[in-house]
Amino acid sequence: MKHFLTLLSHELRMLLVSPSTYIAGTAFLFFMGFIFTGILENYTKAAQDVSPAHVFFQLFWLPVFFMVPLLTMKCLAEERRLGTIETLLTTPVTTTEVVLGKYTAAYALYLSLWGATGGFFYILKRFSSDPRLIDSGPLIGGYVFIAVSGLLFVAIGVFASSLSRNQAVAGILCFVMLAGLIVGVRWLGEASFLNRDMLAPAKAAVDYAQIFAHYEDFTRGVIDARHVLFYFSSTALALIFSILSVEVKQIHA
Amino acid sequence: MSAPPTPAIEVDHLVKTYAGMTAVADLSFTVARGEIIGFLGPNGAGKSTTMRILTGYLPANSGTVRICGHSVATEPDAVKRLIGYMPENNPLPEDMRVSEYLYFRGRLKEIPRRKLSPRIDEVLELCDLKRVRHKIIGQLSKGYRQRVGIAEAILAEPPVIIMDEPTIGLDPHQILIVRDLIAGLRGRMTVIISSHILPEIEMTCDRVLIINRGRVVAQGSPADLRREVLGRTTYQLITAGSIDALPAILTVVEPTLKITANSEPDATGFVTLALSTERTDELGEPLLQSLISHGFRVRALSRAQPTLEDVFLAATRRSWDAKLAPVATPAGTANGFDRP
């Protein structure tokens, strides 16, 4: 792990000097700001049951679908397309260090983009006269959920990027996998055919992986070790698969 | 390093197949420390594959490769610290500055931070890159990019440097710089370069390894190879006189001397002839004396220098002919190759 910090600082620096980071950041904030104003408008029309933060974070999947593929599709696919992975892996670094370096950099960018949305709540707090609009519980729970679930989403993106040398293919693969995980699992949870006794274990597994259910728990202030374990273990799995994928492609180059 | 006993590179019965296609078939060779070796071969001969195996980037199907005594298969980390590698087509990140890139690579190659800046200055100077050190690599011309790749390969001063076509796409002036650069490494580092530019190889390399279809078909110094592969010397003679009597005179001078080609006489009656002999020492003087004493008018006599190109063509052509017997390797080099 000697080279991890070298690789990470290199990746972060490349992100900081790249115009696409700023374009993505601006577009993301614009989009999220749009959603946020939409939510606030609803609050001006009628009293709502839940705080704006709750509704805001409930829409986490919208930016995740578009942002995560864009952030991660480049990381390994680009190295392979340019062939720089060859010079990288012939220095004394391991594949694990390379994948972890790229993953950590992408995750850091993901977090900082979400972190920037904190500004919305600050503005709301500063200019609204109603303190009820800022409920710190769902707010903190929402950010913790974003941070923990982001571990898995970004890892899936890195895995998709390790599968193809074409960035577009990697991006679409990532989108499909994320959609399958977030929306597909939810759909399965509501499907009636899983309610048979015989399929009870499958039903239990599907219920365990319900990301929307996890979100509800987090915003209610319940940080369940099972949920955290779900994200940590599946992140580790996705990263191990990414490392294997890079190494397998090297063998069968 | 005072001449350690292990050779810099030992390759023993290396085999690599891709999806049923054999890229490297039972390749064996040894490179001594400090030697500059040229790797020649037609496209698809297995040059790049061999180089990738040497760096540990590709695993071999069978056979062993040792770099300075360390096995590539079992000690990849040790081997990676011993090599500087410039792959084919010289891939570089497009959006970094030259000095940033070298700094990053230097850190990856475990050069201490303290020594890295002076070392970067040194290689920038060596590769004549000082003017572009703050430029973005993506905006550099091909010649500069190539030199950035070379600078990167020699950055950590590894004992073994492997460069896949370092002079491809360079203009003659830049080739000269690269050649001097490589020559400057002689004795300090072991260098393997592959190239299609044969005069390049001839001028820089101590030894040439010609491979075809994954096998070594000839190896030795360029001079050895000429003798070995072509086995004869050619002279060009421009003369006037009774050409019909010439073969008899030639046989007196040297029994193996034969006329291999002749032209039509020009306006003044001079004929251009190509003579060929198995003797490798100089026959010019006795030949000239003999011709003049027999009343021939001689305008020119020169010994043709076979180029490495001729050697290359002869050696690869020979290897395509499957029935041919193995070539004996010149003395002083390790075992050449095995033919099934």
Image: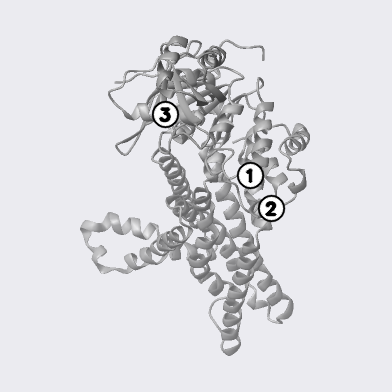
Residue to which mark 3 is pinned = B261
**Mark whose residue sits in front, 3 or 2:** 3
Q: Are marks 3 and 1 on the same chain?
A: yes
Q: Are marks 3 and 2 on the same chain?
A: yes
The residues tagged by marks 3 and 1 sit, at their Cα atoms, a distance apart of 36 Å
Q: How many C-alpha atoms fall within 10 Å of the one at disc 3: few (<14), some, or many (≥20)?
A: few
The C terminus of chain B - image quarter: top left
Q: How many C-alpha atoms fall within 10 Å of the one at disc 1: few (<14), some, or many (≥20)?
A: few
Residue to which mark 1 is pinned = B171
In terms of secondary structure, where does tag 1 sit? loop
In terms of secondary structure, where does tag 3 sit? strand
Q: Can residue A223 be spotted in the picture?
A: no
Q: Amino acid at mark 3?
A: Ala
State left or right for residue B84 relative to residue B249. Answer: right
Question: Could you say where residue A116 lies in the image, as x and y percent from the top left?
Answer: 66, 66
Question: Could you say where residue A25 lies in the image, as x and y percent from the top left?
Answer: 63, 66
Whether the residues at callouts 3 and 2 have beta carbons within 8 Å, the answer is no
Subunit of label 1: B
Subunit of label 3: B
